[in-house]
Image (spheres, coloured by chain):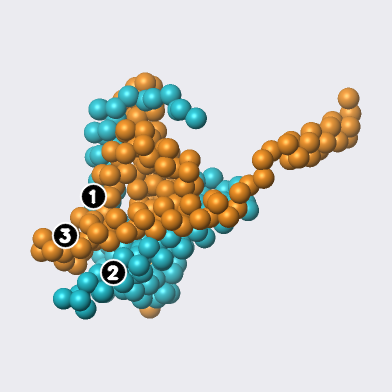
Amino acid sequence: MTGKVKGNVNENYLNYVKTQEPPTKHFKNCAAAFGVGGLICCIGQFIRFMLEYAGLSGDELAGATSVILIFLGCFLTGLGVYDRIGRYAGAGSIVPITGFANSVTSPAIEFKTEGWIYGMAAKMFTVAGAIIVFGVFSGVLVGLVYYFI
Amino acid sequence: MGQEMLEIFLAFLKAFAVGGGICLIAQIIINFTDLTAGKILVYFMLAGVVLTAIGVYQPLVEFAGAGATVPISGFGYLLASGAMKGAEKGFFYAVTGSLSAASAGVTAAVVFAFIMALIFKSRTKRN
């Protein structure tokens, strides 16, 4: 079989697959993402109000709020609940900070079987590592720009 | 009292609308481009850094509260605003400011993930 024919076969196959797969339900997806994402932010706002009532303020308030949300994200991931929410809500569960917690916890639990150092600890940062690398690098750039301007 | 209740209600409404809106943008991008979750997280975090650096994100945080700080772009906001605050104090703090500001989030994620890995076993995904 020559490369050209093979390419055609692949193309035909992909076109066939496209006709068979269910259409993406754009509206339903988007509504679920909006609703769940908004709801998680409301939970964050609620925690914020509670902590403010308890007497926290400023950086401490913001930090404590995200720590509690991250705990909830980690715990629900451990229970297996977060992945179920994720199947329904898509970006609504990925984008909030609880999704970040999920991306750290889920490989940590899953790769435990490959050992504690190269499994659990190393795989913990498959996604979070990328966020921290680009976050720190861009943060340093912003700091330097503001320092020299 | 009524005034106060209205303000609290408005705060929740704003958090819902802005936070939901950010997730909606991400969902639209996912629907039309097949970007994976990890890439979406990195791009939104970077968007938060850039928007903070040019001064757009700070007003959004003041307007929407948790609606702007809870999405991952709020993590970028934390990094960038930490760096900007540090830059006022000196060169050393300009470089270290971003990670210092984000230390609570990173520490919490690592510690809680470790604890969860101790407690829970990997489960077969029920589809």
Furthest residue to the front?
Answer: B2
Provide the secondary structure element on which disc 3 rests: helix
Provide the secondary structure element on which disc 1 rests: helix
Q: Distance between the residues labelled 2 and 1?
A: 22 Å
Colour of chain B, in one word, is cyan
Indicate the amino acid at tag 1: Ile
The answer, for residue A62, to whether it is visible in the render is: yes
Q: Distance between the residues labelled 2 and 3?
A: 17 Å
Q: Residue at 39% x, 58% y: name it.
A: A38
Residue A37 or residue B60, whichever sits in front: A37
Q: Name the residue under label 2.
A: B9
Query: Which image quadrant for residue A120?
Result: top left
In the rendered image, residue A58, in percent from the top left (x then y), is placed at 19, 67
* Label located before the other in sequence (3 or 1): 3
Q: Mark 1 points at which residue?
A: A68
Chain letter belonging to callout 2: B
Residue A117 left/right relative to A27: left
Residue A51's disc is 3
Of badges 2 and 1, nearer the viewer stands 2
In the rendered image, residue A59, in percent from the top left (x then y), is placed at 21, 64
Chain letter belonging to callout 3: A
Q: How far apart are marks 3 and 1 (CA)?
A: 10 Å
